[in-house]
Image: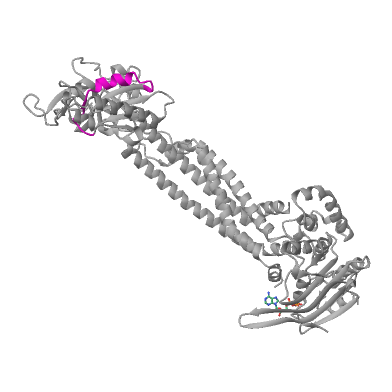
Amino acid sequence: MYKAILAIRYLFKRRISHFSLVAVALCVFVVLVVMTVLSGLTSQFKNNAHLSVGDCIISTKSLVGFAYYEQFLEILDNEKIVEAASPVIKNYAIVKSVTTSSAVPYIERTLKIAGIDPVSHSRVTGFADWLHYNKTDTAKAFEPVYDTNLPGCVMGVGFLFDRDSDGNYLIPEQIPQFEIDVTSFPLTAKGALAKAGTGVVNTKTFAFTDCAQSRISADWQTIYLPFKEAQLLCGMAGAEKRVNAIHIKFKPGVDLPTGCETINALWQNFVTKKAEAAHANLLRKVKVQNWKIYSREMVAVAETQQTMMIFCFAMIGIITVFIVFVVFYMIVCHKTKDIGILKSIGVSNANIKALFLSFAFLVAACGSVIGTLAGWKFLVHINQIEDWLFEHFGFQLFDRTMYAIGDIPNTIDLKVLAGIISVAFLACLAGAFIPSRQAAKLEPVDTLQVNQL
Amino acid sequence: MNDNNFILKAENLHKSYRMGRTQVSVLKGLDLAVKKGEFLAIVGASGSGKSTLLHILGALDRPDKGVVSFKGQNLQQLTNNKLNKFRNAMVGFVFQFYHLLDELNVLENVFLPAMAGKSVLGWITSRAEAKKRAKDLLTQFGLADRVNHKPYQLSGGERQRTAIARALMNQPELLLADEPTGNLDSATGNGILDVFEKLNNNGQTIVMVTHDERIAQRAQRIITLTDGQII
Ligand SMILES: Nc1ncnc2c1ncn2[C@@H]1O[C@H](COP(=O)(O)OP(=O)(O)OP(=O)(O)O)[C@@H](O)[C@H]1O
Ligand SMILES: [Mg+2]
């Protein structure tokens, strides 16, 4: 009982204990805020990466692609875990503006082609959502508003328009009317460059119909074309039509690894059956991957950041331990007299240790509560604070003209919070361990003697 | 003489301190016996080892050699646990510098030994009783209106009376006092000695250490510590 009373008094009556309290609270606050913001950004990013490809991807790295996809799509149609599937043409192209008015964006660059059917691709990915003008009627994504003779194209928003300080793209209200030439290098099923007409390249004119904002790198790299047009352009519409990938979305509740295993089994079975077919070798280059593995180049960056972050926080944890250690060491030095007195009235070493450890426990508890409340309050207002700073000082945490970030994420993950608080407790107890052991070891005579001098 | 008449007995006590290379022998084969109900004063010059002796008698320190026995029980043979119980229940210490806990008020300081000797549950059941005893002791020492004060709000004499109340809290058989008046003016010091006298009249065994012959005169028996021995 006296332990609890003394621990509480030490905490509230001693200025030095207030410092340890503030140290713990600050660490909890900082870690909570940074962890929430960064892991929010990471999970947003992962979510965007997931939305951009679907759950499971059957794909080949070869630009030649693979055939018989229509038969496999039928198999997928009958598979109960599959919600939707979308075949995709993937290739590279040189894109050059035909229209050279200063009123519309001018483009002259290489881009990735994604040949898709807008409706089925929207069922697998977030494509419909990415569109600006045709959000509600995705089927019209490739239908020009002014010249119905030309096929349409959807371009990544990143290389078309600038952004304002809130991070919003400055997209004109009216669809800008301009055309581009898309030039690609068609390949035969054997992988040779196909002669198309007189040259080895295929060029076709497309009308701009929409822009897509997926909030990942695709926004700066990709032009979406109607599936059939892209297939023709890339020389994949021959006798055995080919694609480069099939993106699949699972029904809700389907476990990702299990789902992908099922698809993989179906695919391997299909490949075996097609072993004697023409260009069966192309099928063997195909891989079935879940979205995390498929986009690992992108996701790995985010995960490296997360690892770095956890590493930084391990450092903060060590610093907390040290601060608590120093403060406790000083408290023990201040309190040697008390220790002597307590021992002279028969308090055991174990109880002295327990006294200081319960004090540490209290510091951890109060520090965590204060840090959590402060962090929570700060996070609730973080976007207002950022807006205010921007209005008054022009300061922005993330330059929205550079980064595809909307609001700063501020949802506290309870698991993260629990982790931070447990680490705070561990840090306090670890920091207090040596000083309390030392306190317990003090000889009463020595401590009482010191104060007599 | 019958052993049972002695509450405390020290035989052939040796204690030395090592200060770097030199060894300072403080106690050199000291013998001492304290009778039950006795008020004993130990006098000696400053640095003669009075405090050292008192600490050893109260089991706050161990002798290098020799035996201290309390009611026939050799203190060296006690386990740490038993020693803690001994300090808690059998002896009360009064120090020259009071040694009160600054974070506790006067009443809490006084019932601290009662609280320290009990588990949480034991304390809850005996709390009211302990508080009453602490208040009674403080009233007895004229501190009834000071129970909620903090030690730093008290005068030296008041602090020392608080410390005595604390020492008596668990009704120890032996009260050990190290220069209890050393820091007080003579009037206040005499007040403390009056308290001791009264306690002794009620049967309390007291061993008091002082370098002041005049203060020692208030005790029943005076012994002198010189050169590490009682003469
Ligand atoms: N912890 C210690 N380490 C080294 N020497 C010590 C220690 N404690 C006491 N001494 C020495 O032992 C001798 C006796 O000390 P002690 O405190 O017992 O004297 P005292 O008789 O109580 O003196 P005073 O009347 O001044 O209180 C002194 O010379 C002191 O320097
Ligand atoms: Mg002394």
Residue B180 appears in the figure: no
Residue B62 picture quarter: bottom right
Quadrant housing the C terminus of chain A: bottom right
Q: Residue at x 67, y 55 (%)?
A: A355
Whether residue B153 is situated above or below residue A27 in the rendered picture: below
**Towards the viewer: B83 or A154:** B83
Residue A173 picture quarter: top left
Question: Would residue A234 be found to the left or right of residue B146 on screen?
Answer: left
- Residue extending furthest toward the left: A198
Q: Position of residue A210 (x, y in %)?
A: 28, 23
Whether residue A325 is situated above or below residue A297 in the rendered picture: below
Q: Position of residue B168 (x, y in %)?
A: 84, 62
**Towards the viewer: B85 or B21:** B85
Q: What is the span of residues highlighted in magenta in the rendered image?
A: A61-82
Q: Position of residue A89 (x, y in %)?
A: 23, 26
Question: Would residue A82 be found to the left or right of residue B57 on screen?
Answer: left
Whether residue A399 is situated above or below residue A348 in the rendered picture: above
Residue A68 picture quarter: top left
- Is B209 included in the stretch rendered in magenta? no
Its colouring scheme is: one colour
